[in-house]
Amino acid sequence: MTVITPSGAPLASRIAEYRHCATLLVFLTLRDIRLRYRHTLLGILWAVAQPVLPMLIFAAVFSRTLRFETGAPYFLFVFAGLAPWMFLANAVNSASTAFISNYNLLNKVYFPRAILPAAAVFAFVIDWLVAGAVLAGLCAWNGFAPQMEWLALPAIVPAGVFVAMVAGLGAASLSALFRDMKTVVPFLVQVWMYATPVFYPLDVLPAAIRRVIGFNPMTGVVEAFRACLFGRPLDWTLIAQSAVATVVLTIAVAMLFNALEADLAEQV
């Protein structure tokens, strides 16, 4: 027997409900992957092409003009920032329309609604993994052989996925309320990229700006991802700042989604 719980159900009941629907999450994730790569020319190679093309542009422009000190070849530095960033950007943009594009499903059957944006996010994890595998090969080719720091990568990837899930759920909730969010979300994601050290090192920024950017949830993910690949020590202060920002974002999104969930089908 399936029990439909009200929106104010205790946290333990919510967690049990989502765990019970894990199979649905897997099914929706696989569906999104198949739809995304069906009838495509490059297929999974798009996972590599998307970060590589901007990397070539950034490397051609900034490596010759600004000459950043990155501790690694600039193209590798940028690739290491774009791999997690392209995952987040694509995942959040896709998740933002999860409720609207699944309107018929929302009105036919009950299931935990947050599964829809979560599936959209998980569908892009494979892109990060493929791009990361290519990046790891390039690092080894350029003298950054696998080291003990690489063992932290399995913890960094889930952290980035969690940030994308929270941001995607927030974007999907706002899109259900305001139709113009379909245009606003990609713009905000683009702005978010410039507030993340994707193509520039943090050291070039004034100390005051570095402290502010440290509270960007993706700053800790991108910098930790780079540090592991290039064999540098992790900046735990920066990671703690990003973790605090992630907790605040999670609480805000949870409150928004909790207020919207009961009437989600009607809002969409």
Image (cartoon, rainbow, N blue to C red):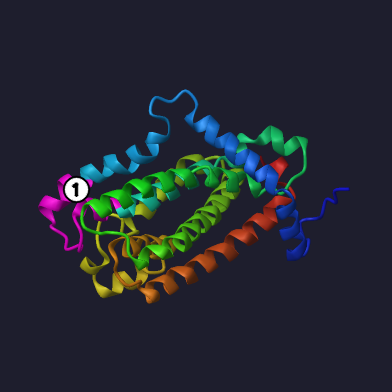
Density class for disc 1 (Cα within 10 Å; few <14, some 14-19, many ≥20) is many
Q: Position of residue 59 (x, y in %)?
A: 19, 48
* Span colored in magenta: 58-79
Q: Is residue 182 magenta?
A: no
The x, y position of residue 143, in whole percent, is 21, 57
Residue 100, how many percent across, how many down? 61, 37
- 9 relative to 208 in the view: left or right: right
The extreme right residue here reads 1
Callout 1: helix, strand or loop?
A: helix
- Residue visible at 37% across and 69% down? 214
Residue placed farthest to the left in the image?
Answer: 64
Residue at the image position 74 percent from the left and 45 percent from the top:
111
Q: Residue at x 32, y 60 (%)?
A: 146
Q: Is residue 138 left or right of residue 105?
A: left
Inspect the magenta stretch and tell me whether residue 65 lies in it.
yes
Q: Residue at x 59, y 44 (%)?
A: 119
Q: Where is 222 relative to 34, above or below? A: below
- Quick check: can you spot residue 60? yes
Answer with the quarter of the image where residue 43 lies: top left
Residue tagged by mark 1?
59
Q: Is residue 184 visible?
A: no
Q: Main secondary structure of the magenta part?
A: helix
